[in-house]
Image: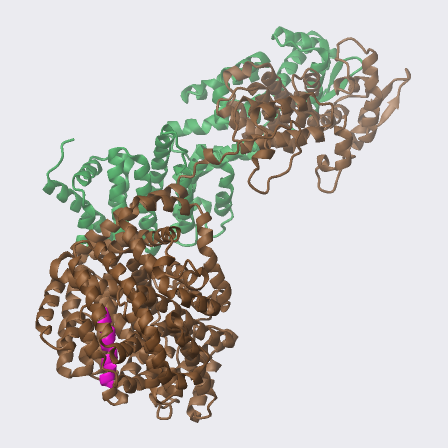
């Protein structure tokens, strides 16, 4: 509401006024400020007022403390360093930043495309604000640019044009900036430098934020501004609700414009350094500008392209330099994003210049036309935009056509000088892409030339050299030093452009903070090879289509008809994509992705956690985006040419599929926004944001459907659905431990497994084969999550086989599984295995507590079971040492109890013999020993010996001898154990099959002999 | 529930807060401990809980004054716990109580003197009891009970706070005992070892300096551990210590000690008087004792079978089962005496058949081989002095003290 009021008022008052006033009006909140600084102090005051209003309005809606803070801090810093002139600019810029944010909130709900972009910008802001401490290497360039710009801009009377444009506030603002600069041009260049310097030096953070906001805007660029601007007018008049939005949008535009102006200056830098007569350079830029500007709003196609590509180009430039140095530093990255902005402004300005000078008539008319349309269509936000778009697109094409020739005409002016800069200038000649290529070239020149030339030139004072050495000395490793070099280059360039390089006291100059190598490392890892990164990004979309998310999103997209408008916009935004996906499309995609990601970090930052990691992450993202763009542009030199042809056919480029894809993508962003908005909401609540909140909620509602889909995909993993259903009909299958997801074609279904179990049970092959088969059956059961009687049967069968051969480890596996299965209530031979379990505990664990607990766990019913009773009897025999009972039980053991007892036999026998040798005197017949110690196979009976028992005699003798017993033959020829003699000579021999690892069952040969049957 | 008025609720809460702060500032541990004692179900705490449930925003009261808010970390979860406790939501109550206990430990760490030990005791006790109840609630809901385990690890932390040097060490034993209770309940007695080591190896602190209450409990549990290990002399020593230091009026405690001490003493050959069993209602041992006295194997087996569950649960089953050999010894001794009365000259030669007949008499159906085996075992274990002549199937007893008494020594194994 506040905003509305202010706007209308300003409008009313301003309208009568000339172009300038209009500007004020448009900019009333964001841009006026821009204007003011250039004009006079009083204006500045007024501007301040505006700013305040905006601020209040914003604060009312948003509680972006950080942003406010930024605003305040900036002015102060400026005042400190520069002076009155600088302050207004700075404040305006800061305003821009602040405004942009709110904007975005509004935007998200409205148009996805705008939203995404805005978000991206927000992310950038956050990102950069985080990095405030760092020196502004990038700025040195802008400074230079400023001086230069002053000159070129003066000639251009862009203001009048803008006046005609009044409608498109955003653009007007951009114009204004140039205008300011022009005025600045009128001013001594020094003042400009001051401004720039202040920004650079003290308020780097702010600056960056602005730039970034611009950047995003740029990218959406023209786009956001255009939409916002067009809509904003309508809204002012008709819709109160939109007031906020409008204001915000305007503001966003304003910052963008400001930045643009700055950017322009920066872009000029190269020119400046090389070409004193900047005007030449500007015209060339104008050639690009026309495209962007002429179509002002929707011209997005052209404008958007330019932004996209430009950043890329600049980035590449920056990256080139980085690569050369081998260590891209954070700061370096800054320049790259910044530069794109600058570039863009340049273009816009240039376009204006061109327009004004050459096509004054054409330009004003076009914008006006659009405006009316926009105004008439106000009620539905999207409808208007669409209409605008259509109009715009048409116009754009027209404009482009128009502009191109003009550009060409302009070119001669700029070219001669530009040629020096590089081959890139030639690109300028090409209509649509000129803009793209130009920035790139200029940027490269900027970074490389500015830095290198500056460094190489032996112009530096000694103090500076020592300063550099000092700084380098602080670096710990190569990366750091490389980064430092980058920073210093920036500093020096700045100083040179400032003209302070010789005047500054370098000895007293504080060293810049050494870049964090960790971050650099990360950057390196990701950015050092921008190409790869780019390729990654290029791939990402395709990858995504495969991902679980994608299909869901697409489905949901269809539901949201309302968003189609957006899609249309979006499509227009990324016009060339389809045809040349790689150059622009890829970059734009990558960018959007990046933007989306960037938004997260930003939010995080809001939450005030500025951990290095996060910063690094943010940085990384930013880098990624930069890299993307850079690659896109660099990659696509060829493609640019191609795309140039297509540039006019933007509308055609949007095939339905492509559009849909865009939609999805953009909706993804929306969703993200929605989430964020929710989280933001709590903060915002305090400030009492009514409208905003409402809007965000709508965004939330829109995004809900997506979220639902997403959640379904991720959280509710349906294990049943994932469970393998086997199709394999083979009965026999070797066991192979799975190293990946099971393949249904190799998994046997339950019926087959049943047959397989039968086959194994009836098999005559040895245990190794059976074990292998049973393991594979168990595996198939497991992967199919079959837990029933069959499972129990398989485990029981396996446990029995294992017991038969004394494979305790395998038996234990089965036993523990069976315990679980029985506990689940699945029927089986519960008692039998309870007995086994008991025997196992008795024989092998030798732990009274375990024994007690497993005994106490036996149910009364279990205790009646024969096998369990037997096991309990064995236990009693063991605890009491009753060997007779033990071997008697051994012989009548049910099931496989004897197998478990087998494992205890040796111990029991030894105990028994030592007991005998102690208790018997004088001798014990070996035959008796053989009887009671189970050497004979036959059932022990009370009456003497029979055939079978004698069978065990030899074994017993062997065993006794092996254990050191003294045997004598008595008068009857019977073998006797000399108890007294044996009592001292008995010993437990090392087991014959002893192996180094202590587990004889693992000795393969022995195992094979035992198991092969 | 009759809800108090708002003012009343407010008054009660601030009352409690004031009590807490006063207790802390005056180091009045008795009243402090009272404030934490949930399980006492004291009317003041219950009414406070009602007040808290009625007056939902007690945290505001805590924050209101600096006096309270400095203990906000302690009090807020305590209130929450009390609320949940009152509402019967024990799992919630446990969670909050653990939070409170952690906060209190933090504070306790900062107090130089050990004045608040009593309060800590209360907390250690309450957290264990609460955890047990919470586990019961959990398992009744079909969830896995794990709170007691959590309480165990918390108490381990408390033990760490106390176990060092200094005046707080006195409290370590109490916490150890609470830990024992938890570990025994959970069946993870192996965890006791580290705590025991830390108690027994600390030379800077004499065991006797611990409070008697804790010493008795400690000895009881360590004695039980020794019973598991079948280290009967040590078990007898520890349990006897517990018995002699136990408050004689605490009959329940004495009974618990005797429950383990009697089997231990039996296996050492020391029989209790019947009146002792009667006094402490340990009649399940009566038959066992009688069997030992008479050499009545049947009675022993019967007694074991009758009380099997009980003995298994308390963990003395295996101990009692081993008394069988002593019963055999007694039986053989009886036969020996009878033979001696008949024919002193041949008394030291016991025919296996006689023993088998005697056993049959006791309805123990054992054949010669088995009895022979048992005789050899008796000889081997030094319960009978002599040898066995296989050829003639005769146990030849030593003429000197053929049936040595154990007299506190364990049976040879």
Rendered position, A640 above or below A537: below
Residue A84, percent from left and from top: 19, 83
In the image, what residue occupies the spot 34% across and 57% down?
Answer: A571
Relative depth, front residue between A98 and B405: A98
In the rendered image of this protein, does residue B163 appear above or below residue A783? below
Horizontal arrangement in the rendering, residue A685 relative to residue A343 (left or right): left
- Residue A267 location (% of width, % of height): 36, 79
Rendering quarter of residue B70:
bottom left
Residue A171 is inside the magenta segment: yes
Q: Nearer the viewer, residue A501 or A660?
A: A660
Q: How is the image coloured?
A: by chain
Queried whether the magenta region covers residue A416, the answer comes back as no
**In screen coordinates, is B260 left or right of A879?**
left
How many marks the image carries: the answer is 0
Q: Position of residue A584 (x, y in %)?
A: 41, 63
Which of the image's four quarters has the C terminus of chain A?
top right
Left or right: A993, with A187 as reference point: right
Q: Is residue A465 above or below residue A813?
A: below
Q: Is residue B383 left or right of residue B388?
A: left
| Residue A90 seen | no
Corner quadrant of residue B122 = top left
Which secondary structure class fits the magenta region best? Answer: helix
Which quarter shows the N terminus of chain A? Answer: bottom left
Q: Provide the residue span drawn in magenta.
A: A170-184
Chain shown brown: that is A
Choose between B167 and A509: the one closer to the eye: A509
Colour of the chain lettered B: green
Q: Is residue A454 at least partly visible in the picture?
A: yes
Q: Position of residue A317 (x, y in %)?
A: 44, 75
Front one among A270 and A612: A270
Residue located at (39% from left, 89% from top): A507
């Amino acid at each position: 509401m506040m905003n509305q009021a202010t706007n209308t008022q300003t409008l009313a008052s301003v309208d009568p006024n000339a172009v300038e006033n209009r500007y004020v009006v448009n900019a009333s909140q964001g841009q006026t400020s821009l204007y003011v600084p250039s004009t006079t102090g009083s204006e500045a005051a007024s501007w301040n007022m505006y700013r305040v209003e905006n601020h209040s309005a914003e604060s009312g809606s948003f509680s972006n403390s950080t942003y406010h803070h930024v605003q305040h801090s900036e002015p102060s810093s400026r005042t400190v360093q520069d002076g009155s002139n600088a302050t207004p600019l700075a404040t305006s810029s800061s305003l821009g930043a602040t405004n942009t944010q709110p904007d975005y909130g509004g935007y998200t709900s409205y148009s996805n495309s705008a939203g995404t972009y805005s978000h991206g910008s927000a992310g950038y802001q956050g990102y950069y604000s985080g990095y405030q401490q760092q020196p502004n290497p990038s700025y040195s360039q802008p400074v230079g640019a400023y001086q230069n710009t002053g000159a070129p801009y003066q000639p251009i009377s862009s203001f009048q044009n803008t006046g005609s444009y009044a409608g498109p506030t955003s653009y007007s603002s951009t114009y204004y900036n140039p205008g300011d600069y022009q005025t600045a041009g009128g001013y001594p260049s020094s003042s400009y430098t001051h401004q720039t310097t202040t920004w650079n030096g003290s308020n780097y953070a702010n600056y960056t934020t602005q730039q970034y906001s611009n950047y995003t805007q740029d990218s959406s660029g023209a786009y956001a501004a255009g939409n916002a601007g067009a809509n904003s007018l309508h809204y002012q008049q008709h819709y109160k609700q939109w007031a906020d939005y409008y204001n915000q949008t305007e503001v966003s535009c304003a910052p963008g414009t400001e930045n643009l102006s700055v950017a322009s200056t920066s872009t000029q830098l190269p020119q400046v350094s090389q070409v004193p007569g900047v005007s030449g350079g500007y015209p060339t830029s104008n050639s690009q500008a026309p495209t962007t500007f002429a179509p002002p709003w929707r011209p997005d196609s052209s404008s958007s392209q330019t932004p996209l590509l430009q950043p890329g180009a600049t980035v590449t430039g920056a990256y080139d330099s980085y690569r050369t140095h081998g260590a891209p530093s954070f700061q370096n990255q800054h320049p790259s994003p910044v530069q794109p902005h600058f570039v863009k402004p340049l273009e816009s300005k240039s376009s204006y210049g061109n327009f004004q000078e050459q096509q004054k008539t054409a330009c004003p008319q076009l914008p006006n036309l659009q405006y009316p349309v926009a105004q008439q269509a106000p009620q539905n936000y999207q409808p208007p935009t669409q209409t605008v778009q259509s109009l715009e697109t048409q116009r754009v094409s027209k404009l482009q056509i128009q502009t191109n020739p003009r550009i060409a005409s302009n070119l001669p002016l700029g070219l001669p000088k530009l040629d020096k800069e590089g081959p890139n200038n030639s690109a300028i000649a090409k209509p649509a892409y000129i803009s793209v290529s130009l920035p790139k070239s200029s940027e490269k020149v900027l970074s490389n030339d500015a830095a290198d030339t500056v460094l190489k030139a032996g112009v530096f004072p000694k103090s500076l050299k020592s300063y550099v050495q000092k700084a380098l000395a602080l670096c710990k490793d190569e990366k750091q030093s490389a980064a430092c070099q980058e920073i210093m280059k920036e500093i020096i360039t700045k100083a040179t452009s400032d003209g302070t390089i010789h005047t500054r006291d370098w000895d007293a100059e504080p060293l810049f903070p050494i870049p964090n190598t960790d971050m650099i490392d990360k950057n390196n890892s990701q950015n050092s090879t921008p190409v790869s990164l780019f390729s990654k990004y290029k791939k990402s979309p395709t990858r995504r289509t495969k991902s679980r998310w994608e299909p869901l999103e697409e489905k949901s997209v269809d539901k949201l008809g309302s968003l189609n408008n957006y899609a249309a916009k979006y499509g227009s935004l990324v016009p060339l994509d389809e045809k040349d996906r790689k150059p622009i499309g890829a970059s734009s995609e990558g960018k959007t992705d990046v933007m989306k990601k960037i938004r997260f970090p930003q939010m995080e930052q809001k939450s005030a956690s500025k951990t290095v990691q996060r910063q690094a992450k943010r940085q990384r993202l930013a880098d990624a985006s930069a890299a993307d763009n850079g690659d896109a542009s660099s990659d696509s030199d060829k493609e640019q040419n191609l795309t140039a042809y297509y540039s006019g056919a933007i509308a055609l480029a949007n095939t339905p599929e492509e559009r849909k894809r865009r939609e999805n993508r953009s909706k993804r962003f929306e969703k993200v926004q929605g989430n964020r908005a929710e989280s933001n909401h709590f903060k915002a609540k305090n400030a009492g944001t009514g409208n905003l909140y409402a809007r965000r909620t709508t965004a939330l509602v829109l995004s809900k459907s997506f979220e639902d889909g997403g959640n379904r995909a991720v959280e509710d993993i349906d294990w049943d659905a994932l469970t393998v259903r086997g199709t394999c009909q083979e009965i026999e299958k070797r066991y192979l431990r799975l190293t990946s997801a099971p393949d249904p074609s190799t998994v046997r279904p339950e019926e087959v497994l049943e047959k397989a179990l039968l086959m194994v049970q009836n098999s005559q092959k040895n245990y190794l084969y059976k074990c292998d088969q049973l393991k594979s059956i168990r595996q198939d059961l497991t992967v199919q999550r079959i837990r029933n009687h069959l499972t129990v049967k398989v485990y029981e069968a396996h446990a029995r086989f294992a017991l038969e051969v004394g494979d305790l480890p395998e038996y234990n596996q089965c036993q523990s599984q069976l315990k679980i299965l029985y506990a689940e209530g699945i029927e089986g031979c519960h008692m039998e295995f309870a007995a086994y379990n008991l025997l196992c505990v008795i024989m092998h664990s030798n732990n009274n507590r375990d024994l007690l607990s497993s005994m106490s766990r036996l149910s009364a019913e279990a205790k009646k079971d024969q096998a369990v009773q037997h096991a309990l009897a064995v236990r009693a025999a063991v605890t009491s040492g009753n060997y007779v009972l033990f071997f008697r039980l051994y012989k009548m053991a049910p099931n496989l109890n004897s197998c478990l007892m087998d494992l205890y036999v040796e111990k029991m026998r030894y105990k028994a013999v030592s007991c005998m040798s102690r208790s018997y005197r004088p001798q014990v017949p070996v035959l008796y020993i053989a009887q009671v110690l189970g050497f004979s196979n036959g059932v022990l009976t009370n009456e003497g010996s029979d055939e079978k028992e004698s069978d065990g005699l030899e074994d017993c003798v062997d065993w006794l001898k092996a254990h050191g017993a003294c045997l004598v033959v008595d008068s009857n020829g019977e073998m006797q154990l000399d108890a007294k003699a044996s009592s001292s000579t008995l010993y437990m021999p090392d087991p014959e099959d002893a192996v180094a690892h202590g587990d004889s069952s693992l000795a393969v040969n022995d195992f094979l002999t035992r198991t092969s049957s | 529930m009759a809800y108090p008025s708002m003012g009343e609720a407010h008054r009660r809460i601030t009352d409690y807060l004031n009590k807490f702060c006063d207790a802390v500032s005056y180091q009045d541990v008795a009243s402090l401990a009272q404030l934490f004692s949930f399980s006492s179900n004291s009317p003041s705490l219950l009414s406070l809980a009602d007040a808290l449930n009625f007056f939902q925003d007690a945290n505001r009261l805590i924050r209101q004054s600096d006096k309270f808010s400095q203990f906000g970390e302690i009090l807020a979860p305590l209130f929450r716990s009390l609320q949940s406790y009152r509402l019967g939501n024990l799992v919630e109550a446990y969670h909050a109580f653990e939070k409170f206990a952690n906060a209190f430990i933090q504070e306790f760490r900062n107090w130089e003197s050990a004045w608040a030990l009593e309060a800590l005791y209360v907390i250690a006790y309450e957290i264990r009891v609460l955890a047990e109840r919470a586990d019961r609630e959990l398992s009744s809901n079909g969830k896995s009970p794990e709170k007691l385990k959590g309480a165990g690890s918390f108490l381990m932390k408390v033990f760490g706070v106390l176990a060092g040097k200094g005046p707080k060490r006195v409290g370590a034993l109490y916490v150890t005992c609470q830990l024992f209770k938890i570990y025994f309940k959970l069946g993870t007695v192996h965890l006791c070892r580290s705590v025991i080591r830390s108690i027994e190896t600390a030379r800077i602190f004499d065991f006797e300096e611990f409070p008697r209450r804790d010493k008795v409990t400690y000895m009881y549990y360590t004695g039980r551990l020794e019973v598991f290990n079948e280290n009967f002399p040590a078990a007898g020593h520890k349990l006897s210590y517990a018995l002699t230091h136990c408050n004689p009026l605490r009959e329940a405690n004495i009974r618990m000690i005797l429950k383990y001490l009697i089997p231990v003493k039996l296996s050492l050959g020391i029989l209790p008087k019947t009146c002792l069993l009667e006094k402490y209602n340990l009649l399940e041992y009566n038959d066992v004792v009688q069997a030992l006295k008479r050499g009545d194997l049947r009675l022993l087996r019967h007694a074991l079978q009758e009380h099997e569950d009980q003995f298994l649960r308390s963990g003395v089953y295996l101990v009692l089962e081993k008394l069988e050999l002593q019963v055999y010894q007694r039986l053989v001794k009886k036969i020996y005496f009878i033979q001696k009365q008949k024919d002193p000259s041949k008394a030291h030669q016991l025919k296996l058949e006689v023993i088998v007949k005697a056993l049959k008499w006791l309805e123990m159906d054992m054949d010669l081989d088995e009895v022979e085996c048992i005789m050899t075992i008796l000889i081997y274990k030094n319960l009978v002095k002599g040898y066995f002549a296989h050829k003639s199937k005769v146990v030849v007893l030593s003429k000197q003290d053929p049936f040595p008494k154990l007299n506190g020594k364990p049976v040879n194994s």
